Every structure is written in C-alpha cells, then in structure tokens.
Amino acid sequence: MKTRTSVLYKDGFWAFLMLLPNIVGFLMFLLLPVLATFVISFSGWNLTDSFQFNGFRNYKELFQDPVFPQVLGNTFYFTLVSVPVGIVLSLLLAVFLNQKLNLMRFYRAAFFIPVISSMVAVGVIWQWIYNPEFGLLNYALSWFGIDGPAWLTSTHWAMPAIIITSIWKSLGFNMLIFLAGLQSISESYYEAADIDGASWFSKFRNITVPLLSPTTFFVTVMSVINSFQVFDTVYLMTQGGPARTTSVLVFYIFQNAFQYFRMGYASAMAYVLFFIVLIVTFVQFWRQKKWSIY
C-alpha cells in the first residue's frame, strides 16, 4: 500500500512538472494581462504619468466618443458580410474537394497555402492586386469593359476589399474543417438517396447540410470571434482609412494604446469588445439547438 501511494505521488509530481511550463505560460501571458487590463481600464494611465484610478470615466467617455460608433459599425459590417460569405464559399469548396478527382491533394494544398502564409506577404500581394493603375483586378475587369475603382482609397470599396482579402486568407482553414466533416458522413446515406433517384442538389440539401450542422456551428462561432478581432489586414492595407471607413474596433484600440498612449481608455474599449463577443457567442450557443443536429 505504501509503495503504491509512493508511486502515485511520484507520477503526480512528474505530471505537474510536465504541465508547469503551460501553467506558467497561462498565468503570465493570459490571466495576468487580462486582470491587469481590467484594472487599467479604470485609470487614466498613459505609460509616463503615475497610475491613478478615475473610476468609470473611460467607460463614460467611450459612449461620448464620436469615433466609437463608427468603428463599432465598421466591425459589425465586416462581420455580417465576411462570416456568411466565407462560410458558404468554404463549404462549396470543401464539397468540390471531397470528390475523387485527379490532383485532388494538390488542389487541397493550394487552397490551404494562404492560411500558413505571412499576413505581411498577403497584404503586399493584395495591395498590388488592388492597385488602380497596374493591379491585376482592374486589369481583369477591363476585359469586360468595367473601369475598376481605386479599391483601397475609395470610401465605398475599401471595406469590401478588406473583406475579400480576409475571406481569401481564412478560406482554406474553414474548408479543411468542412472537409473533415464531410468525410465523417456515412456513404450509406448517399447510396440510399441514389436508389431513390435523388439529384445532387437534393442530396446536398437534405443530407449534407443537415449532417454538417455541428461543423457549420463550430465554423460560425470561430469565424464570428475572429472577425471581431480583425486587425492585421486593416493595419497593413489601409491603416484604417480612407476617412476611417475601414477602421475597426481592434485597430482603434491599437491606436489609443500605442499611438495616443491612452492605455486606460484602450483597456476599457477592449473590455467592451470582450463583452460584445461574449454576448454574441452566448446567443449563438442559445440558438444552435434550433438548427444544429447531433
């Protein structure tokens, strides 16, 4: 009995030792910054002056800031367009790549390359594609007699350009998840549908879409969370312009924290963003029982 207890203590010690780097990393790089941000959000700290609490002043100022509704609207605009369009495109792409065709592994790898590519490289490539003078997109549009706009400097087209780039960057990741979901569906359902003479669209609508609903739910939740945190695409391609039409919430937080050095105000904004994402995610989980089939 004593020997067995000794072995358990020894195993527990080694298990704790193996987990220690992750525990330290979680405390130092996640929990501590989260708690520090919460405390800073009640201060007027600007990195140089002494730390002073100012109560809820940052939160009051937030709702009087004329820029805040605009960046919040831009964030919702980005989310409401990029998430459904990205999900539909990645689902259709996964259905196509689930066929038994030649060079299928090459196609799957090709569509996944943007996911592992550096965002800096992606930004440079798409800035060249959107260039109004020698860009590839306007050149392609000219074949159809369409005079393309100055995408990244137009107040109407800058946000759609950001959305297209973001969808292209994340398409491969969502496609991979849908592909895994498709391959988990039993072939017997499709064979039974073939016996009944069902068309491709009928099988897609009545078998594929319902049985993929758990996968679709997961992709939707992750896509919404990621879209509320979009930053690098905006920072690299437009710097929030023109006229703040592409300035989203995280970019505005970055500006207040590291350009205006208003750490307290930026922290308050970060917590508002956290509660927005929390509420949206809660609503998604609440509604998923209505359409997700397990």
Image (cartoon, helix red, strand yellow):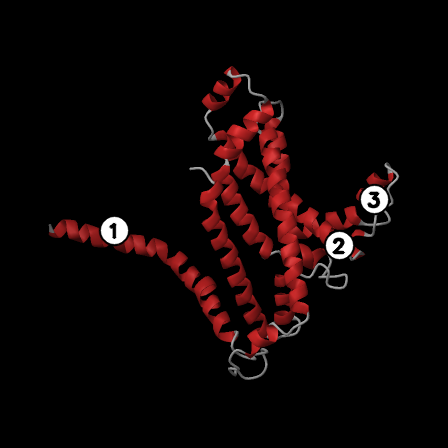
Residue 280 against residue 210 in the figure, above or below:
below
Residue 279 appears left or right of 12:
right
User: Separation of disc 1 and disc 3 at Cα?
Assistant: 64 Å
Identify which residue is drawn at 61% across, 72% down: 63
Q: Nearer the viewer, mark 3 or mark 2?
A: 2
Q: Is the C terminus in the top left, top right, bottom left or bottom right quadrant? A: top left
Kindly indicate whether the residue at mark 2 contacts the one at mark 3 (C-beta within 8 angstroms).
no
Residue in the picture at 65% in, 66% down: 69
Residue 235 visible in this rendered orientation of the protein: yes
Viewer-nearest of labels 1 and 2? Answer: 2
Real-space Cα separation, disc 1 to disc 2, in angstroms: 57 Å
As helix, strand or loop, the secondary structure at mark 2 comes to: helix
Kind of residue sitting beneath label 3: Asn
Is disc 1 in contact with disc 3, using a CB cutoff of under 8 Å? no
**The quadrant where residue 115 appears:** top right
Residue at the disc numbered 3: 138
Whether residue 231 is visible to the viewer of this picture, yes or no, is no
Up the image or down, 65 lies above or below 197; here it is below
As drawn, the label of residue 11 is 1
Q: How crowded is mark 2: few (under 14 residues within 10 Å), some or many (20 or more)?
A: many
Q: Where is residue 258 in the image (x, y as percent from the top left)?
A: 63, 70
Q: Which amino acid does label 1 sit on?
A: Asp
Residue 51 relative to residue 20: left or right: right
Q: Which residue is drawn at 82% across and 52% down?
A: 150
Q: Residue beneath label 2, please?
A: 158
